[in-house]
Amino acid sequence: MKIVVIGGTGLIGTKLAALLTGHEVVPAAPSTGVNTITGEGLADVLKGADVVVDVANSPSFEAGPVMEFFKTSTGNLLQAEDAAGVRHHVGISIVGTERLPDNAYFAAKLAQEALVKASGIPYSLVHATQFMEFVAAIADEGTWDDGKVHIAPVAWAPIAADDVAANLARVATGEPLNARIDIAGPDEYRMDEFFRKALAERGDTREVVTDEHARYFGSELTERSLVPIGEATLGEVHYDEWYAAQGGR
């Protein structure tokens, strides 16, 4: 089976490609001559493709550019898939997208999903919780002018990128779901407590402030904004194990 991984040179794409043994796997990205914004290389890379997994991400999270990226990239990709006779489109999104309508990135992902659902191409959508790999970046985003990290006391279940890739591999090699599944880390925490412990482990001396109005990339959170509601597939990698494997980085 030929599987094209759009965004195949990124964090998830490289891990996914390594897992898809026994298949013809083609990582596609601007660095390999495939550009979903301009359409360059799409027709050629999709010739004979059975499955396309789209894990490409926007270079900007600003409202206008991120919406333009996902609409243009996904629109071009789906058009090329239709012409090539691709039988299964797999996309990745975020748990809670529909619960934070004022979040520009989440709104763009919802627009992307709408295009996929309307395309007529059999599809599967994987909604993941936030990656463990982005803990430091989230702490930086939550740092106010007072030098303190403001975090909301809500449910939080980060997932390792390895678990995300493993779930995408399973979905990509199966039959189209024509639906979405949610995946999350194996443990659920209080977000503020998690960051207090995680930063201390890193030797980061910033104070973590429990703040009900702390914003998460621009949005205020409710109790379960960022974790699955209902059935979900849980990953196998616990945060402490993941952090230890990073060598304390």
Image (cartoon, grey):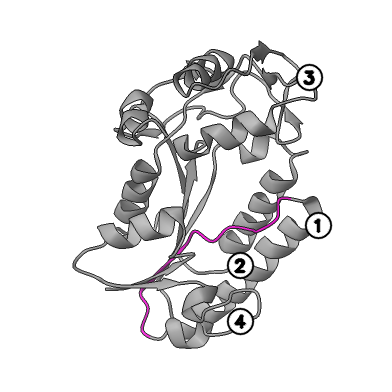
Q: CA distance from mark 1 to mark 3?
A: 29 Å
Q: Which mark is residue 64?
A: 1
- Using the image as rendered, state which of residue 1 and residue 117 is in the foreground: 1
Amino acid of disc 2? Thr
For the point 38% across and 30% down, which residue is it?
Answer: 248
- Using the image as rendered, state which of residue 58 and residue 201 is in the foreground: 201
User: Which callout, 2 or 1, points to the residue nearer the camera?
Assistant: 1
Q: Along the polypeptide, which appears first: circle 1 or circle 3?
A: 1
Q: Along the polypeptide, which appears first: circle 2 or circle 1?
A: 1
Please report contact status of discs 2 and 3: CB closer than 8 Å, yes or no. Answer: no
User: Which callout, 2 or 3, points to the residue nearer the camera?
Assistant: 3
For the point 79% across and 51% down, which residue is it?
Answer: 63
Which region of the structure is painted magenta? Answer: 48-61
Q: CA distance from mark 1 to mark 4?
A: 20 Å
Counting from the top left corner in percent of width and height, residue 37 is at: 65, 74
Q: Which residue is mark 4?
A: 39
- Residue count near mark 3 (Cα–Cα under 10 Å), binned few <14, some 14–19, many ≥20: few
Q: CA distance from mark 2 to mark 1?
A: 16 Å
Q: CA distance from mark 4 to mark 2?
A: 10 Å
Q: Which mark is residue 146?
A: 3
For the point 52% across and 38% down, which residue is it?
Answer: 134
Q: CA distance from mark 2 to mark 3?
A: 40 Å
Q: Which residue is mark 2?
A: 74
